[in-house]
Image (cartoon, grey):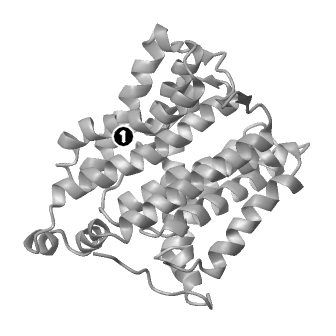
Amino acid sequence: MTTPRPGTVLTAAATLALPLALRDDHLTLYVLLGLAAMVTIGLSMLMGYAGQVSLGQASFYALGGYAAGLIGVHGGPTLLGLLAAPAVAAAVALVVGVPILRLRGHQLAFATLALQLILLSLLGDATWAGGAIGLQGIPHLSIAGVELDRDIDYAYLTWAGVAVTMVVAHNVMSSRTGRGLRALATSETAAAASGVPVGRYRLLVFAVSAAFAGLAGGVYAFYVGYLAPGSFPVLLSVQFVVMAVVGGLGTIWGGLFGAAAVTLLVQLLTDFGTRPGMPSYAPSVLSYAVYAVLLVLVVLFLPHGLVPALRKWWPWHRPVRTRR
């Protein structure tokens, strides 16, 4: 049995205590930070271990949201909607992943970007999904007859989802499959020569990362109660990539720390940009600027990201164990 690391225990304790101490507006930020972390953990696995660059991760976030929202709007059990969200996103990833994962590098990045643009176009014309106006009237999530209608409920729900994604990611990466993925990240040719089923493993991690994004989308749908194609812009996918790179590709904690760093910094600059006397375009300009500046600084000074750099000074760090 694996003994929990002190860092894990401290993080879990802080996660449980924080919602009780936060104001309502800070709880909203806390929920959005957790949702971003769920997506980024999957993207960090996808880019760090399978070597696949995705510029369309927000499309799976949208698929999960719409799957959950449509079930809720049409009177279905909302818990079923939440469970369907990752399943639908993973199923779509398996279908589209077979052809597009044959591509490499910038071609794959453009293909995933095109996937999101096509999805947004389809959703904008789909009257059954609310079209360009959006899907309105999504009910709150209800579990065993208890309706989750407060921000603090969704704070705990979101961070329970973060815990689930971290446990799943850890188990995948510490398994035989994870060992094959690490070999794949080092050299695809060498991994294939060693008997690693490259295509199958790429498709698996693509589907797992999509499921994480879909689960986040499902929680988001029930939390905000409204979805529209404009809720999932291309910039959102770029934001997830920046979070993954800043935190450290191929590290589970990197997804969490990257999401936290970027979300908090963008929020800080947004608050600054909305102060009296600032031009109306200041918040969006500052948001774009922070992505560019962060990427440049990380590439120059922390090429492996925040978490690999912090591990050098972390007293309780120990290597990840693998099992057969």
**Residue occupied by mark 1:** 90
On the image, the x and y values in percent for residue 203 come to 25, 50
Q: Residues within 10 Å of mark 1 (few under 14, many from 20)?
A: many
Residue at x 44%, y 12% (from the top left corner): 126
Q: Is residue 221 in view?
A: yes
Foreground of the two, 305 or 2: 2
Task: Identify the image quadrant of residue 309.
Answer: bottom right
Left or right, 18 with reference to 249: right
On the image, the x and y values in percent for residue 3 come to 56, 80
Identify residue type, mark 1: Ala
On the image, the x and y values in percent for residue 96 come to 26, 37
Residue at x 69%, y 66% (from the top left corner): 12
Task: Identify the image quadrant of residue 274.
Answer: top right
Looking at the picture, does residue 67 appear above or below residue 125? below
Residue farthest to the left? 193
Residue farthest to the top? 127
Residue farthest to the right? 276
Foreground of the two, 314 or 177: 177
Residue at x 16%, y 49% (from the top left corner): 102
On the image, the x and y values in percent for residue 300 come to 50, 77
Q: Is residue 235 in view?
A: no
Left or right, 38 with reference to 175: right
- SS class, disc 1: helix
Left or right, 54 with reference to 261: left
